[in-house]
Amino acid sequence: MERDKKRGVERLLDLLGVGAGAVFGLIALATTYDVLLRSATGDTLAGLAELVEYTLFASTFLAAPWLLRHNGHVQVDFAVGALPERPRRLVRRIADGIGLLVCLVLLVYSVQVTWTAWRDGSIVLKTLVFPEWWLFAVVVVSMALLVLEFARRLWIGQVEPSGARDF
């Protein structure tokens, strides 16, 4: 049962990571099409800039737990990497603890903001119109998954970064 939960979370993170990559590719294609359309006809795709803005926001937040799982986040660890093994592991565990606490604070705050936007019926009113809480819910999901990932790293110990990786 525990193993199935672990696989389920890993699959969810993989889905979010692959989904974010696909969204970034679609954004590039849509933006290219829009530029060509504007150059050829003077027209543009209504709402595309907003859609790109919101999908970049969502994809970035939702890919963050996947990046953390795979040590794909930006690291400047020349000083930490130069430490002997025990102090290096301690520093990384402290960093994971700080990450956990920060994500917990952001999770609580984002839940409050999402709830308030839902309760008040706030909407985003631009070219695209939708409930504002949809945007904030992305942060809630991301922070919850980051909390789980930081807790996992603290529980089992962080896997050592293995240098630059291609995804």
Image (tube, rainbow, N blue to C red):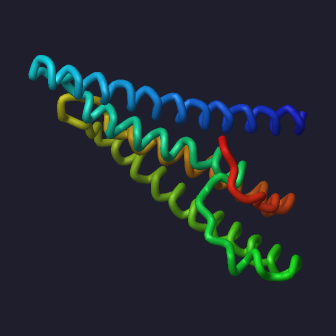
Q: Residue at x 62, y 65 (%)?
A: 75
Q: Position of residue 22 (x, y in %)?
A: 52, 28
Give the vertical position of 93 relative to 33 (above or below): below
Q: Residue at x 48, y 47 (%)?
A: 139
* Of the pair 19 and 99, the residue shown nearer to us: 19
Give the vertical position of 27 relative to 138 (above or below): above
Quarter of the picture holding the N terminus: top right
Quarter residue 166 falls in: top right
Give the vertical position of 117 relative to 20 (above or below): below
Q: Is residue 148 visible?
A: no
Quarter residue 43 falls in: top left
Q: Residue at x 65, y 52 (%)?
A: 72
Q: Is residue 64 left or right of residue 132?
A: right
Q: Position of residue 93 (x, y in %)?
A: 76, 71
Q: Residue at x 58, y 49 (%)?
A: 64
Q: Position of residue 115 (x, y in %)?
A: 42, 45
Q: Position of residue 8 (x, y in %)?
A: 76, 32
Quarter of the picture holding the C terminus: top right
